[in-house]
Image (tube, rainbow, N blue to C red):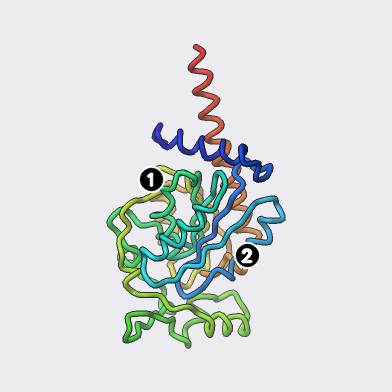
Amino acid sequence: MPNTLKTLTAAALAGSVAFGVNANPVPNIVLVHGAFADGSGWRGVYDELTARGYDVSIVQNPLTSFADDVSATQRVLNRQDGAVILVGHSYGGSVITEAGTDPKVVGLVYVAAFAPEVGQSTLDQYSEIPPPPNFVPEEQPDGFAYLNADHFHAGFAGDTDEAEAAFLRDAQVPIAMAALAAPVTVAAWKTKPSWFVVATEDGAIAPDLLRSTARRIGAETTEVRGSHVVFLTQPKAVADVIDAAAKGAAEAVQGTDAGAAAASTE
């Protein structure tokens, strides 16, 4: 981690203590949803994390453009007192890759997510491994896309029951295809520690693409049996990874500070 970033991260951690937000060294979790959904799917993860003492905020991306979604995330980050773990699902991983350079962010968690390289878009990542056959976006005349209704259950939410899958299908939020085609200009994972949840039954992003992405960014990786909406169907397992990220980010920065203090006395 570059020295400048260490300073910023340490300041964020110190800020969390100064504000007295709560007892966790990294008290704040910000959750960012992906395409074809809204933030309500995070409810189970929210309940798990708030029960553990975290202050949790959920971004509601408009999905109208990549810039709009980054701005929506930044708007929530601006409201946080102290250090933040920033979490993104699916396309939300691209959003946190861009927005995660905020100095309050001390760690990133990718949940069945994209993590583009600088200059790469969300859609560019599919050039490595194409999406599974049941993931079928259908672009409308206005440039926004919905997922094909017939393939929705298998492609997006394979481990939900028929009723829940039908609700998710009928409540889906369309995304501007231009948002998926927009390249990131920075990559926060290059300078911030990252954690990754691989959904082993993902029908929207091939699990092998998730694994290769996690390796490429050097993330600490956990595999969870679940569909693309693993955060919805396995909230405890996902919350466990976020909890570990918060503790790991705090320990890493505190360890760096202790080492620096010891060196200064030699």
Relative to residue 216, is residue 232 drawn left or right?
Answer: right
Quadrant in the picture for residue 213: bottom left
Determine the secondary structure under disc 1: helix
What's the residue at 56%, 39% (across, down)?
Answer: 15
Badge 1 local density, few (<14 within 10 Å), some, or many (20+)?
A: some
Image depth: mark 1 or mark 2 in front: 1
- Looking at the image, which is closer to me, 84 or 48? 84
Single out the residue that lies furthest toward the left: 119
- Looking at the image, which is closer to me, 22 or 93? 22
Single out the residue that lies furthest toward the right: 51
Which residue position is annotated with label 2? 234
Quadrant in the picture for residue 191: top left
Q: Amino acid at mark 1?
A: Lys
Which residue position is annotated with label 1? 190
What's the residue at 52%, 28% (across, down)?
Answer: 257
Q: How far is mark 1 from mark 2, CA to CA?
A: 28 Å
What's the residue at 59%, 41% (across, down)?
Answer: 16
What's the residue at 65%, 45% (across, down)?
Answer: 21
User: Residue 90 at x, y = what percent?
Assistant: 46, 65
Single out the residue that lies furthest toward the top: 266
228 lies above or below 153:
above
Relative to residue 141, is residue 61 drawn left or right?
Answer: right
User: Residue 146 at x, y = what percent?
Assistant: 42, 81
User: Residue 168 at x, y = what percent?
Assistant: 55, 80
- Looking at the image, which is closer to me, 110 or 85? 85
User: Residue 40 at x, y = what percent?
Assistant: 59, 70
* Image quadrant containing the N terminus: top left
